[in-house]
Amino acid sequence: SDMKFKNMLIGTFVSYLTISCIQDEALNVEAAIDGCNGSNIQLININDLSREIDVFVFEGADITAQELNFTLPDGATICPEKPQSNDNPPFYDFSTEKNRKFTVTSEDGNNKATYTINLYTIELPLKYSFENLKEINPYHILYLTDISGLMQWASGNQGYSLCGMASNAMQYPTVQSDGGFSGKCVKLVTQSTGSFGMNTIPKMPIAAGNLFIGSFDIASAILAPRQATKFGFPFTRKPIKMSGYYKYKPGTTLTDQNGNVIPDKTDTGDIYAVLYEAPNSDFSLDGDLFTANNEKAKNIVLLARIDKMKTTDQWTRFDLDFKLQNNKTIDEEKLKAGKYKLAIVFSSSIQGAYFEGATGSELCIDEVEITCE
């Protein structure tokens, strides 16, 4: 019975220790916003220093009930400084005030941090002159608009950086260049990926110069390269025509994905735009777009694509009509609600997504315009 008593004492002591440890565990003192997401959001910039968060939604999004899911430190809470009658967290009303203050309170209640949430509605521009460069080492990124920083063109430059073949920004497949039809232009050049590209699975011996509206997912660049290119941005108008200017010079030797020469065939570039149904903001077409039996391609409603690109060192105009696809028509309500996306794509090698192309193929593009109804 002495033993029993000892065990009981030890058990009581352990229980006491456990309880006192729980009581002594300090409550979290952090007050911050670590992240934010929500439907219809196209882009978010969080500035921790100024405690400002810029949230970009497409033109036509319902800003009386904008979803904001905040990522906060453990135990922290958040609430708007001046609640609106329509607020129903995580949905907040920005219709009367585009800049609203939100206060985060730490779990222990002692620390507070106030952030300003700036809501911007953005619409895809209709003219592209390729004058606005945000040069990020080691490669070029071009802005879509004059409002620097808001929206940018995507390219495969980020993926090309993995092969280590470029020693400066001008040796990447996609660069801004002098000598445009007017001012600067964009120059797309099919480049070799060297030994890196021949040792990947699948093999990627070349990288076509490309530029597109959308985003590039570096995490998929090697294992699923065509899925890494995500095309499109919400669009609320009916496009009729895409026009602009190009110059094209094919490389001397066309090779396939295994690096074997394809005889009696010359490389050609590609210019196209698609309007497609996007049932949700995460849905996007990718580099498999023109693969036979591609399920996602059934969402295409309109396509404008160059038929035969000429080899020319003179600026040559293109006028491409948008043509209905898949027996579809445009639903006006869905168009207003941002349920369609527009993608514009340029490539120096038409089969570049399948790593077929000629090193040195060069496509220059300038002064592109989308005409709408």
Image (tube, rainbow, N blue to C red):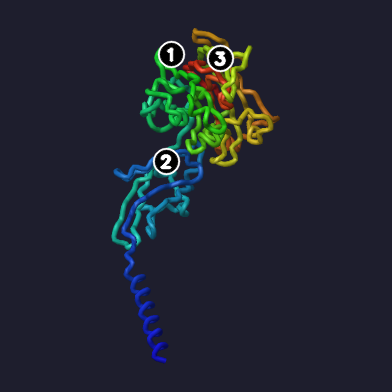
Residue named by callout 1: 180
Q: Is residue 319 above or below residue 21?
A: above
Specify which label sits upstream in the sequence, 1 or 3.
1
- In the current view of this chain or complex, which residue is farthest to the right? 327
Where residue 19 sits: x, y (%)? 37, 74
Q: Is residue 28 above or below residue 155?
A: below
Few, some or many residues within 10 Å of mark 2 (<14, 14–19, 20+): some
- Which residue does the image show at 48% across and 26% down from the upper left? 195
Few, some or many residues within 10 Å of mark 3 (<14, 14–19, 20+): some
For marks 2 and 3, give the one nearer the viewer.
Answer: 3
Where residue 324 sits: x, y (%)? 66, 26
Q: SS for tag 3? A: loop
> Gap between marks 2 and 3, in whole Å?
43 Å
Q: Give the quadrant of residue 262.
A: top right
Which of 370 and 12 lies nearest the eye of the viewer?
12
Which of 210 and 222 lies nearest the eye of the viewer?
222
Q: SS for tag 1? A: loop
Q: Amino acid at mark 2?
A: Ile
Q: Amino acid at mark 3?
A: Thr
Residue named by callout 3: 253
Few, some or many residues within 10 Å of mark 1 (<14, 14–19, 20+): many
For marks 1 and 3, give the one nearer the viewer.
Answer: 3
Residue named by callout 2: 44
> Gap between marks 2 and 1, in whole Å?
32 Å
- Which residue does the image show at 39% across and 14% down from the upper left? 178
> Gap between marks 1 and 3, in whole Å?
26 Å
